[in-house]
Amino acid sequence: MPKVLFYAGTAFCFFVALASAGEVAREVQDGTLAFAALPASSRAAWAIAVALIAGLASAALFLRMASLLAARNLFAALVSVVSVAGALASLTAVLLLQWRLIAVGAPLAEVHLAAFFSLGFFVSLSALSLRPYFSIQASRVLSAVVFCPLPLFALIMLQEFYVGASRGPLPASTPASQVFFAVQSILFFAIAIHSVRHRHLFLEMTNLRELLDARVDPAGHGRPIGDVAFDS
């Protein structure tokens, strides 16, 4: 992984963590939800650009973790790649819809709301799919925190279906959404700290041929152990 991309991804993980914490404070104080360029302001274009760059840089870290996980748990790695791709596609759709919403107004509000929920689902699934990686390389706390976003997102969707549907481009602020953003803040902050502490895992080259070579027992006169280096 290139150093520039790694350090950019780490910095933007810190940024996402701070932005999520600020969103929790905003919801508690004002009772409204904001995301990127919404509510509209004079800095909408800059907000959209920064959100897109932050998403790209953070996704690069998630994909690197998925590549490190592939040798041990290929299924989880594939789910991670699909989830990160879905999250990045949903984020791009949300930001493009925000750009058009500022120009044309309400007709795209419902489409933006659906895209926003799609983004929340894929971000939550991305965190959960990387749990095998966090359980090996990180702490038990982080591997437990990744369980939280998806149930919280399911609770938000249940409130949308059975309590009251949101009207507008963003969902209504609820205690579930506040806890969801708080968990995202903790999660991204922990991922940034983990990346800095284990930067050698992200920066060093991965030789896929070595992953397929059999391990050799030095005390067993060259006797191979298992079939491949990372057999489970």
Image: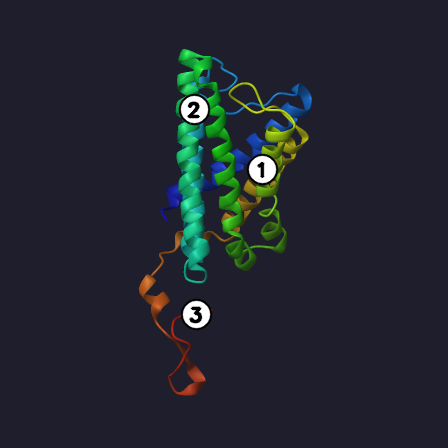
Q: Secondary structure at mark 1?
A: helix
The residue beneath circle 1 is 153
Q: Residues within 10 Å of mark 2 (few under 14, many from 20)?
A: many
Residue 223 lies left or right of residue 192; in this view the side is left
- Could you tell me the amino acid type at mark 1? Phe
Residue for point 57% across, 32% down: 20
Mark 1 to mark 2 CA distance (whole Å): 23 Å
Q: Position of residue 206 (x, y in %)?
A: 36, 58
Q: Give the mark nearest the N terminus, 1 or 2.
A: 2
| Residue closest to the eye, 104 or 210 | 104
Q: Give the mark nearest the N terminus, 3 or 2.
A: 2
Q: Position of residue 13 (x, y in %)?
A: 50, 39
Determine whether 15 is above or below 28 in the image.
below
Q: Give the mark nearest the N terminus, 3 or 1.
A: 1
- Could you tell me the amino acid type at mark 2? Ile
Mark 3 to mark 2 CA distance (whole Å): 44 Å
Occupied quadrant, residue 94 = top left
- Could you tell me the amino acid type at mark 3? Asp
Which residue reaches farthest left?
209
Residue 17 lies left or right of residue 42; in this view the side is right
Residue for point 50% across, 55% down: 133
The residue beneath circle 3 is 231
The residue beneath circle 2 is 48
Q: Position of residue 30 (x, y in %)?
A: 66, 19
Which residue reaches farthest bottom?
221
Q: Position of residue 119 (x, y in %)?
A: 48, 34
Residue 207 lies left or right of residue 220; in this view the side is left
Mark 3 to mark 1 CA distance (whole Å): 35 Å
Residue 71 visible in image: yes
Residue for point 44% across, 49% down: 80
